Amino acid sequence: MTIPVTIRVQEDDFDVAKETAALIAGRPEIGAIVSFIGVCRSGEGDAAISEMTLEHYPGMAEEEIARHANDAIERWPLNGLTVIHRYGRVVPGDNIVLVLAASVHREAAFVAVEFLMDYLKSNAPFWKSEKRADGSQEQWVEARKSDDDAAARWKE
């Protein structure tokens, strides 16, 4: 059975309620929808940021997200999947990423969202730079070992 999968990389914001409604429309078999919404945070003290710029490799980003979405579909009994990732300038409070997984029961949806977010945080072809609230020079965000460790557990 082919399930609906939506993957978008876009500059514009997304509407979580609209995306959720689109995922489940006419799908009475769905009993669980799990969502993750990543939001730009301001941070605190010396780490406070005023804005972030997200860049991606057009075409490759969508292809890589689709590859991991297909992996999730093969691993867990899902009934629908939506992954939206923004690029461009965002400020604290703005949405960055949305992952929705639908299934008959909650367990598959929870684990699929966690799997996809671990991939997006560690290996997706996106790059972030942050502008500090104190006006210091913009800097690229380095990969974190904790994100790599989280993604590595899915290879077992």
Image (spheres, rainbow, N blue to C red):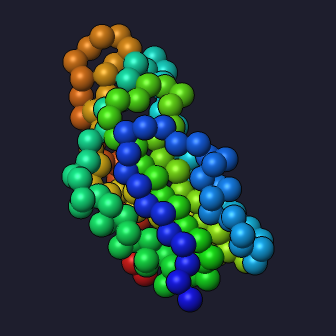
In the rendered image, the vertical position of residue 6 relative to residue 37, given as above or below: below
In the rendered image, the vertical position of residue 105 relative to residue 16, given as above or below: below
Q: Residue 70 location in percent, x, y?
A: 43, 77
The residue furthest top is 134
Residue 128 appears in the figure: yes
Q: Residue 21 location in percent, x, y?
A: 68, 56
Position of 100 with respect to 154 (left or right) is: right
Position of 101 with respect to 118 (left or right) is: right
Which picture quadrant has residue 78? bottom right
- The quarter in which the N terminus is drawn is bottom right
In the rendered image, the vertical position of residue 115 relative to residue 29, given as above or below: above
Q: Residue 142 location in percent, x, y?
A: 27, 42
Residue sitting at x 45%, y 17%: 45
Residue sitting at x 24%, y 61%: 60
Position of 57 with respect to 23 (left or right) is: left
Residue sitting at x 55%, y 78%: 3
The image shows a total of numbered marks equal to 0
Decide which of 130, 83 is in the foreground and name it. Answer: 83
The residue furthest front is 26
- The quarter in which the C terminus is drawn is bottom left
Residue 147 appears in the figure: no
Residue sitting at x 35%, y 10%: 134
The residue furthest bottom is 1
